[in-house]
Image (cartoon, rainbow, N blue to C red):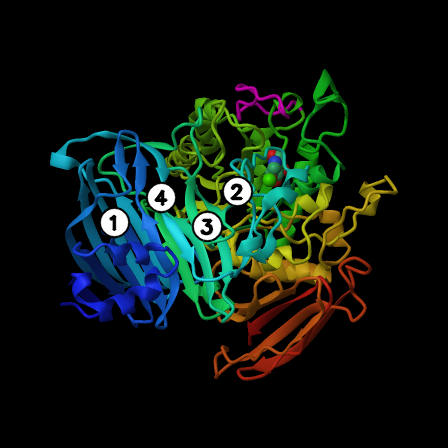
Amino acid sequence: MERGFLHLNVYFCHSIAYIMKITNALRFSGLMLLLLASTNLALSQTVVASPSGKIKLTFFISPTGQAFYSVNYNGKPIVGASKMGFYLEGRNYTKGFELKGSKTNSLDETWEPVWGEESKIRNHYNELAVSLQNKDGLLDIIFRVFDDGVGFRYVFPKAGGKTETLTVMEELTEFQMTADHLAWWQPGDWDSNEHDYSTTKISKINGIRYANETAISTQFIPDYKAVQTPIALRTAEGVHLAIHEAALVNFPAMQLKVDNATKKLTAFLIPSAGLWRKAVVETGFATPWRTILISPNAAGLLLSRLILNLNEPSKISDVSWIKPVKYVGIWWELHLGKTTWDYSGSQSGQTMQGTQPHGRHGATTENTKRYIDFAAEHGFKGVLVEGWNTGWEDWFGKWKEDVFDFQTPYPDYDLKSLAAYSIQKGAPLIVHHETSASATGYEKHYDAAYKLMNSLGLNAIKSGYVGRIIPKGEWHDGQWMINHYQRVLEKAAEHKIMVDAHEPVRPTGLHRTWPNFLACEAARGNEFNAWSKGNPPEHETILPFTRLLGGPMDYTPGIFNIQFKEYKTDPNNTNQVHTTLAKQLALYVTMYSPLQMAADLPEHYEKNLAAFQFIKDVAVDWDQTKVLNAAIGDYVTYARKAKGTNNWFIGSITDENARTFAPKLDFLDADKTYEATIYEDAADAHWQKNPTAVNIRKMTVKKGDTLNLKLVAGGGAAISLIAK
Ligand code: NOJ
Ligand code: CA
């Protein structure tokens, strides 16, 4: 028998002592009474432990043939007895199961991502695969138990080698929490992940306040007792959990229905159009992994690579064209209203009237050149241009299939010469493809659009899915759209194009398999600060522990003109970025992404080139990542070593509370000294009252030294440590 595995077949009516042992695991399901009442049924139980033995997962089948798992952490239950299974059309996969067989396996490997938070990732787990059968068919479940959590997936085997179609009506998977943990969550929206977070006990989860959200273009929250994943949780003892999924392919996204009373979270799959079914798959299909990160502290969640490890290795063999990139672009000026996406007409209600140029178009040849020159001067490797292509007069809120062709530039945008100029200057255009959520419209044109990019020598897109989905009736997070996002990634890979998707489903580690998937939005980005109540100062201290667990985010940090009063002439307008300038710098380190925008306007950076230097210097690809301190929703401090160099960058951010930190530089090389440049909040800075006051100081440091950092309310600190 392999170390870490224990197989038991317990005739539990014969062993009262054993019943006492499993009491804890079963306590939360109410199942124990049922078990005790029956006398001569067999209970099949299998335990699989993580490599260190800290985490133990138990799989068992109840007397009625229901499949269950539970998880112990350091000898105590952390997930109580939780049901597994499915409702399939014509098949009941919820009970009547017998264990037909089980297999174990182990892996300990180290692999190298194309880009990432670390250049080497260890994948170390013990695996248990069980084969179940009931009168309706076969179901396999594969469990992987790591030292930082567990993952499991279902497989629908091909009975007798035959391919059959299965209609999934609902998934039964439960996550039985053991107490009323504190949770960081956003509501179970079928169309958007762009809400701010709530922090409540499980017993208080109720998303009704989100009904008043007006800034999200498309939202649908039918059940206030459902939440998105990743959800982060903290027990009274300080154990941290995060529930999410890995490798979401050909299946709807999973949300969680919350039972406030029993603290049970139950899988809820986003429906397909017509609402009655969740997914259609064929036998042979393996579902995404359901994942539970388990850590003694908040930092452990950030350092877990479990979700990536559960994704398959890269399917792109030549990855030489995939490059992390810092970019600038014609973007924030559109959100501020300085210029517009559209070229002609004037606003009348929701639509544009007329075809005459109104003179406020942002994506002109001249303006784009200005950005390219700025990028070249300051070392940025990409220039995003939004509003370059025809269609913007006709897109917003219309729910039309044919709006954009992604090939025809506006008359004042010389695509060809700009592409050539941008390449010559070392800052190639990043091509914007706003699909207006017409996924079918996009699929009509993407081949030709990518070919056009190939012919121009451009290799990065930013896509977007603002609006209600076409095909009508589908949801952003349903199976049809999951397959669409996948088709885009694969089609783009064929054309050697990197993808940054906005408004897609939240990521699940697929960038391991498709490293051209550089980043996505799928959360509330900095843009909300431009035109809505914005993102509260705690927002960026929650994202790393929730949304970012699935993959990088194109958050678009780096706003220097925090209050942008000159663009908001209405005296009652209170929009502003809800951080200090120093915190905007720190976000380049705390919000991990291989794609980072310097989002503000060139003229705003030109007024503060000293602070801009940090954005120019900071890396976007890393050899190592350390978390120096962390508390979800309060603060986080990261130190990261830039790939292939001896330089480190530190980012430290706080919520609405001022804090002091004294991080120790014990991760530096003993035989080197470093020039530290510290960009910090001025003593009188404050995210609302005085956001742009920043101090910059330099000092020489070495391993073991301590930094003294003072972060003001909504503030942060960014530090570059350049090896001498
Ligand atoms: C929403 C995206 O998040 C934003 O970045 C983009 O500018 C607009 N859609 C327009 O496509
Ligand atoms: Ca968005």
Label 1: element kind: strand
State which tag comes first along the sequence, 2 or 4. 4
Badge 1: residue crowd in 10 Å (few <14, some 14–19, many ≥20): many
Quadrant in which the C terminus is drawn: bottom right
Query: Is residue 113 at all visible to an observer of this figure?
Result: no
In space, the residues marked 2 and 3 are separated at their CA atoms by 34 Å
Which residue was labeled with disc 3?
323
Residue 252 is marked as none
Give the residue type that dot 2 points to. Gly
Could you tell me residue 303's position as x and y percent? Answer: 45, 65
Q: From the viewer's perspective, is 136 left or right of 419? A: left
In the image, farthest residue toward the right: 571
Residue 141 is marked as 1
The residue at 67%/22% (across/down) is 393
Q: From the viewer's perspective, is 579 left or right of 383? A: right
In the image, farthest residue toward the top: 354
